[in-house]
Amino acid sequence: MDFVKKWEERWDEALKLWSDYVKLTPAKFLFSASEEKVEGLTGSFAAIRLLDHRVLLSVEQIQKYKLEDYPLEIMGHEIGHHVYCPGDLTDQAKLIYLAGLALPRLGHLTSTIVNVYEDLYINDHLKRYQHLRMEEVYQRIGKNKDRFWNFYMRTYELLWALPSETLTDGKVDDLIQSDASLVCRMIRNFPNDWQKGMFDFASICFPYFFDENGVGSSNIQNLSTILDTLDAGKGMTPPSGITDIEVESEIFSSEIGSLTKRELGPADFSSICKAMGIEADISDIVYRFYKDKALPHLVPFPELRTPGAKENILEGNELWDPGSPIEQINWIESTIRSPIVVPGYTTVEDLYGEVESMEVRTNPIDLDLFVDCSGSMPNPQTSLSYLTLAGAIISLSALRTGSSVRVTLWSGEKEYETTNGFIRNEKEILKVLTGYFGGGTCFPLDLLEEGYKEKPKRKRHILIISDDGIDTMFTQKFPRDPRFIAKNALEKAEGGGSMVLQLYNPKGNSIVNEMGKSGWELYPISNWEDLIQFSKEFVQRNYVRNQILR
């Protein structure tokens, strides 16, 4: 254990390998297998944790591989993961996704391939610019006849101009030589933009994990020793900023084709989180996904503006009338006019006029959102739901202007979920929006009736997203008149009502036509993707013309 103190003393030196300004909490040394298990370090002699930006080091494993004399090589490498590649959770997630596209049937190896790819950049940087003994670390780990391991080691031999068999086990074949040469070109071409080479690297790696019969063939036991980013995201919340990722390739460009600009779905996002060790509830994962998708599309949600009270402005003086209150006399101006004050003759009072106030008060309109979640609608937890996305865009837009939002997800009779009234908690709002029933169709008239028994304190806009099933608002068996309930809600809300509907026969639906005549603004759409455009036009079509109230 004597080496631990020496390593601790060289921590600052390891930080300066990357920059004089890098600051990280000193590495945490783990002295037993039980400590390693608690901290999540399994198999490898070192690892990083993005949650608290820590470096974890296994004392027993370092001794096992006789690495006590390589403090800068090992600590510098782990620091490189924090400050260089990947650097943060978002970049790690992007690499995980790109690798996954190139590794069908090998989802369990995605994190492994990303890890060794990142190591190539970090090790090459430390070897070329800091002249550290990176190859000696791999020599201590030992050689292996596994084809993938030899391909990986041959890449280092070419990068650092090392003689053959310095790291590889025996003479490598032409395929390994060719693949290693391609990877060397990537590492040197994309040292500051390593996302560009991830798809190609994973594609090159793919065949090494299958034999000629399509059966898994590679032994990754050696790899587990060097894997230090597998659970880097453990304890963290799902990352942001990865709902759309551009796939680039210099080698396999013909194969990626339409994948060049790839839009992720919630299932993709969930798989990425799992691969990074993020143990989050599906509702939290889907919440983050739809929030990120909605943010670029936020619109200026309607608000009513009321001018402030008119302001008085001094226009001059006039003779004070003895019948007026004495407090209105301007004594200074009166004495300037005459040193002898004679009330009613020499006394004056101020004369004021009125001007419009520059102050404008904003009165947000609350949003009452009803989203159809019957069996004809997509499940937002497994595939991209434009109903959910449109609801998220409009709800988040409303929250930005100070509005409160009530969201109701509805399906069959008495089958709905709603927020606890009108709230401003975006997570609770999106949690309801991203739920799913997938049952029958029956609009929740009882909720609409209950919400508008009395006139609300603030104006509300009622927005309904559905399809032909919206006719259940009028056609269902209900103890009271559905048409009166709908009309009463519109009148009490005072902020208008809109229905965005995907209709099979817009002109031939008599119930929907009746709804349009009774005061609802109807927006028929041909497919759910049109909801995004509706979100952008929502304000212009309803509110801009009457935004200022006098």
Image (cartoon, rainbow, N blue to C red):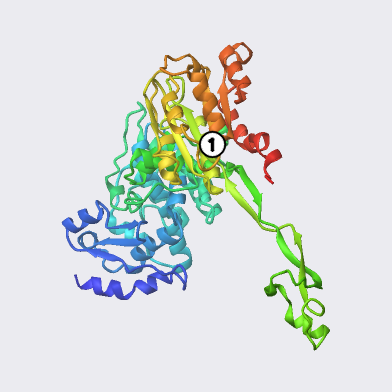
Q: Which percent across, then down, holds residue 1?
A: 19, 70
Which residue is more in the foreground, 10 or 498? 498
Which residue is more in the foreground, 70 or 270? 270
Residue 32 visible (yes or no):
yes
Q: Count residues near mark 1 (Cα–Cα under 10 Å), then give few for <14, some for 14-19, many for 20+.
A: few
Q: Which percent across, then down, holds residue 350?
A: 76, 72
Q: Which percent across, then down, holds residue 3?
A: 24, 71
The quadrant holding residue 162 is bottom left
Q: Name the residue under label 1.
A: 262
In the rendered view, does 44 fall on the left or right side of 519? left
Above or below — where is 79 with respect to 497?
Answer: below
In the rendered view, does 43 fall on the left or right side of 118? left
Which residue is more in the foreground, 286 or 258? 286
The quadrant holding residue 346 is bottom right
In the rendered view, does 181 fall on the left or right side of 412? right
The residue type indicated by label 1 comes to Arg
Question: At numbered mark 1, what does the secondary structure look like: helix, strand or loop?
Answer: strand
Residue 245 visible (yes or no):
no
Q: Which percent across, then down, holds residue 194?
A: 51, 51
| Residue displayed at 20% across by 53% down | 37
The quadrant holding residue 124 is bottom left
In the rendered view, does 20 fall on the left or right side of 134? right
